Amino acid sequence: MTRTYSRITGTGSYLPPRRLTNADLVAELATQGVETSDDWIVERTGIRARHFADAGVSTSDLALHAARQALEAAGLEAKDIDLIVVATSTPDMVFPSAACILQNKLGIAGCPAFDVQAVCSGFVYALTVADAMIRTGTAHKALVVGAEVFSRILDFSDRTTCVLFGDGAGAVVLEASETPGILASDLHADGKHVGILCVPGQVSGGVVAGHAMLKMDGPAVFKLAVGVLEEAARATLAKAGKTEADIDWLIPHQANIRIMQSTAKRLKLSMDKVIVTVDQHGNTSAASIPLALDAGVRSGKVKKGDTLMLEGVGGGFTWGAVLLNL
Ligand code: ACO
């Protein structure tokens, strides 16, 4: 009996047109009495610019652009898709899911569509879920999207967080294949760390209760992130029977260049093997990995047949990795 695997057959991405360099953001924050600088942001994070969606533009709008590009790259039409999974922590509304809204915007109906909420690890979670559904025959051609409008949950009076994030979307088409494709994945969560990275708000009685703005203990997240990213990468390589030397490209969650440098060093990979977009996108949470993947593919660096290690870490605390052959 032939086994079924899943394989990425197309990638796409989208950034909203409003781009703010650090200088733009520093000037805007100064008008509100919030002091920061290009030097601090670049030195501590590697971020130089980010994109913010205009008012009225939602996660599903960004997802739609990225999804259309991924479909085109895969040579498919929306009607061919039989599963939609969207990784997001900033959905259009409490419910229905951004995935259902995206499905309607794509002009299709009937296939299962749902969101996965694992914050910045969302895309590796979503990819793993879609891979499992394809391997069991539940789906054959899936659209897996990471899309966020984090600008909506930023507290612009908190300089320790508001300079870090941006908006965007990335998407892949994942199809059933006789050859892998996705080789292995490794996902984890530890809810005891909820307090170091959260948006502690909810809708109650028609109003927002709590504080619906992003709160982060950056240094605590940083310390945890470096360790778990190495562990997840090593566990994934072991499951696939591979070593660091087999990795052509490391495509990590784009939160901070220093986290990426530490992870690469621990995995004995040179930074030449790491796709970096944090400088131009900032941290786009669940969108960051598929955005970086698509940037790598479209720049010609990441090629068909390459072995890629995708890895994410974020609120929850959640973390995980996916090793795949493109
Ligand atoms: N501009 C100027 N100064 C600032 C700013 C700013 N924007 N923000 C903080 N500072 C100051 C602080 O007040 C502090 O000053 P003090 O020493 O006088 O108290 C100083 O800079 C150092 O602050 P730290 O927080 O210790 O700086 P650090 O080097 O740790 O960098 C950062 C902070 C960039 C947030 C880092 O900790 C980080 O990247 N953490 C990880 C974030 C991450 O990976 N998140 C991933 C998941 S995101 C998700 O899931 C949604």
Image (spheres, grey):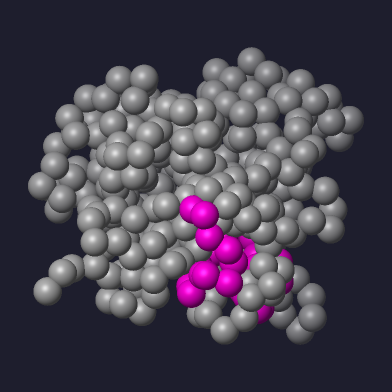
For this rendering, which residue is in front, 214 or 96?
96
Is 137 drawn above or below residue 239 in the view shown? below
Residue 240 picture location, percent across and down: 15, 50
For this rendering, which residue is in front, 261 or 227?
261
The residue positioned 47% from the left and 36% from the top of the image is: 297
Please say whether residue 189 is visible from this viewpoint.
no
Which quarter of the rendering shows the N terminus? bottom left
Question: Is 81 situated left or right of 53 in this image?
Answer: left
The residue positioned 52% from the left and 54% from the top of the image is: 75
Residue 29: quadrant of the picture: top right
Where are the magenta residues, as a range?
74-102
Please say whether residue 51 is visible from this viewpoint.
yes
For this rendering, which residue is in front, 49 or 163?
49
For this rendering, which residue is in front, 318 or 2?
2
Residue reaching furthest to the top: 39
Residue 298 picture location, percent across and down: 52, 34
Residue 10 picture location, percent across and down: 47, 50
Q: Is residue 257 magenta?
A: no
Q: Is residue 76 magenta?
A: yes
